[in-house]
Image (cartoon, rainbow, N blue to C red):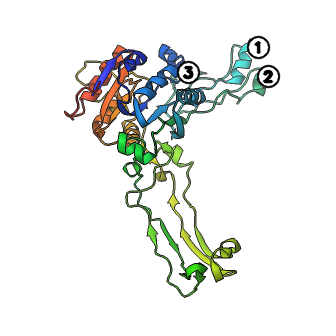
Amino acid sequence: MNIVHGDCLEVMRGMADNSVDSIVTDPPYGLSFMGKKWDYDVPGEDIWRECLRVLKPGGHLLAFAGTRTQHRMAVRIEDAGFEIRDMIAWVYGSGFPKSHNVGNAVDKSLGCENRGHAISSGSQIHPTTGKPRANGELLPKYEGRTDEGKKWAGFGTALKPAMEPITVARKPLIGTVADNVLTHGTGALNIDGCRVATAEKMSFSKAAPFTENGQQGRTWNPTSTPGIEREQNASGRWPANLIHDGSDEVKELFPETKSGSINGTYNNTIMAQSNGDRNGKPIHLEFNGDSGSAARFFYCAKASRSERNAGLEGMGEMQNHHPTVKPLALMRYLCRLVTPPGGIVLDPFAGSGSTGKACALEGFRFIGIEREAEYCEIARARIAAVDVGLFGAAL
């Protein structure tokens, strides 16, 4: 495991071509988040070109982004030479609206000093009495003080954040995907390694009232034995391009459903024309669809305080104060999805080391680059807390 302190562009320029198997990173979103200077813009095309160069042919890149700047991130990645393969949506219920209260702003612009009850939910001071509010007490709804303020009461400027997109890109293959994986060990996604476990039973059965009739095709035979019932893969569901945090708020968006069920007799004259003397005969199909809710998708909670600070116990009062720490389960899942066994994962924006810690737990080698010295120290401590003892510097 290796955390390199420095500018990622300069560090990557010192790395060999085709030397890493995957890139999993949480780069700046270009939102000036919490006033951080490093978040003034999304990474430029020059950085993604270096990522392309050091990545093996067919290697995958996963890059988090903000909803407002996802388009800029994806375009720069694509312009650098990557193929955009997909986008994964990470959905969560714990986002807090960062909206401007328009009614409040109108009152203020008209010189009204008493602007009603417009305080953040995190405040413990009651807006009217000025005293600490009792536990469970509901704050009175904002009421405009001017006629115009009342007109615009209830209007805001932003939605509640509940999703972060992850760009899925791939360095172009050399030859076919089979040629590429045989030569470079990259180019494929680890589908079975990322299946979503489920206790649900999904089955598929199809009546087979046809018998082969030589050159005449399949002949209608209503007495033939029905088709074999097929159950879902024992390892679970095929991984989807949606991930969620398992919160009640998110699960409520996925009501219990049962989809894809077919059980009946149908006429299909188009198919009949290509199947000999079956012409005009009905077809009986039976398909038992899957059921469930958000459990169909991979889910993990946001990083807890204990998870963020695990490994920093011996560093005095130091805490992991990085503002965008990603959950460990999520990073393990993403690294496993795009990295071949024993491969090298690069994170050019390592932050507090969540990708590196995920790699240590998954058995991957890791190169992390971080410009801020304080985050390098935190990342090294967090990764060192994982008892692996197998991986040395890969750079």
How many residues crowd mark 3 within 10 Å: few (<14), some (14–19), many (20+)? Answer: some
Residue 167 in percent (x, y) is at 52, 35
Is any part of residue 296 visible from this angle? yes
Q: Residue at x 74, y 21 (%)?
A: 145
Pick whichever, 151 or 304, lies toward us. 304
> Which quarter of the rendering shows the C terminus?
top left
Q: Secondary structure at mark 3?
A: loop
Mark 2 and mark 1 in contact (Cβ < 8 Å)? yes
Amino acid type at mark 2: Glu
Please name whichever residue, 214 or 352, is drawn nearer the observer in this view of the structure: 214
Provide the residue designation for mark 1: 110
The quadrant of the rendering that contains the N terminus is: top left
Dot 2, crowdedness within 10 Å: few (<14), some or many (≥20)? Answer: some
Residue most extreme to the right: 147
Q: Position of residue 143 (x, y in %)?
A: 70, 26
Which residue is disc 3 drawn over?
31
Q: Is residue 297 left or right of residue 261?
A: left
Q: Is residue 140 above or below residue 188?
A: above
Left or right of 304? Residue 168 is: right
Per the image, the residue denoted by label 2 is 148
